[in-house]
Image (cartoon, helix red, strand yellow):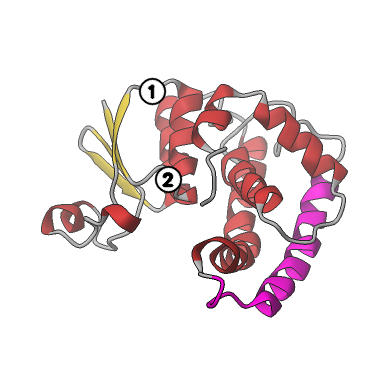
Amino acid sequence: MLTVWGRKNSLNVQKAMWAIGELGLEHTRHDVGGPFGGLDTPEYLALNPNGRIPTVVDGDVIVWESNAVVRYLAAAHGAGSLWPTGAGVRAISDQWMDWVSMEVMGNLTLAFWHLVRFSEDERDMDVVKTAAAALASTFALLDRHLTGRTFIAGDQLTMGDVPAGAAVYRYLTLEMDRPALPAVRAYFDRLQERSAYRQHVMIPLS
C-alpha cells in the first residue's frame, strides 16, 4: 500500500493525491510540513533529503518531487489512463507538466503567498499586480491550447492534466484580476465533475 507524506493543503501534495484518487489506489497519508513540521527529522530526511513534500513510498520505491511522483504513479499504476500508451500523447502530457512548473508556478506561488499566507501588513499588492499580469498572459496561452480540446492531451485525462488542473484551481480561486479565459473555465468545469479532483484539489486556500 502507498504511503504519502505531506499536508493536504499543499498544492504539490494535492497533485500526488489527485493522481492516487483517479487511480483508486489504497494509501495512507501522514501530515507533515507547514504547521505540522517533521520535515527536518532524521527519519524524514532519510526518505527525502530535500526535506520537502510530497514523498511517496510504494513498497521499495521512494519518490519525491511532485511531478516525478505523478509520473511514477501514472507509469506504475495507470498505463492506458493517466499514463498514455502512445509516445506522442505522452510527450504532450510531459511538455505541459514541465510548462506548468516553469511558466506558471513562480508567479502563482508569489501571488498565493502575498494574498493568502502573508498578513495584511506583509502583503505587497504591487507584487500581486505584477504576478497577475504575468499569469494573465501565461493562462491565455493555456486557454488557446485548450480551445477545442477536452483535456490537456486530447479526449482523455492524463498525467498532463494533474499539474495544470491543480494550478487552474488555485489561479481561479485567488482574488486577482484575470482575463475571461473561456476554454480554461470550461476545462475547470469538466474537472469539477471528477470526484478525486473535488476531494483532493478543491481545498480552501487559507
What distance separates the C-alpha of mark 1 from that of mark 2? 15 Å
The reply to whether the C-beta atoms of the residues labelled 1 and 2 are less than 8 Å apart is no
Q: Quadrant of residue 8?
A: top left
Question: At label 2, which amino acid type do we have?
Answer: Val
In the rendered image, is residue 80 in sight?
yes
Residue at the image position 46 percent from the left and 26 percent from the top: 21
Depicted 9 relative to depicted 128: above or below: above
Depicted 182 relative to depicted 135: above or below: above
Q: Nearer the viewer, residue 24 or 180?
A: 180
Residue at the image position 66 percent from the left and 29 percent from the top: 192
Depicted 154 relative to depicted 131: above or below: above
Residue at the image position 27 percent from the left and 52 percent from the top: 36
Q: Is residue 98 left or right of residue 27?
A: right
Q: Which residues are magenta?
A: 120-145
Query: Secondary structure under badge 2?
Result: helix
At which x and y percent is residue 178? 80, 57
How many residues crowd around disc 2 within 10 Å: few (fewer than 14), some, or many (20 or more)? many
Q: Which residue is mark 2?
A: 13
Question: At label 1, which amino acid type do we have?
Answer: Leu
Q: How many marks?
A: 2
In the rendered image, is residue 74 in sight?
no
Q: Is residue 79 left or right of residue 27?
A: right
Residue at the image position 61 percent from the left and 24 percent from the top: 194
At which x and y percent is residue 28? 28, 30
Q: Quadrant of residue 3?
A: top left
Depicted 24 relative to depicted 165: above or below: above
> Which numbered dot is residue 25?
1
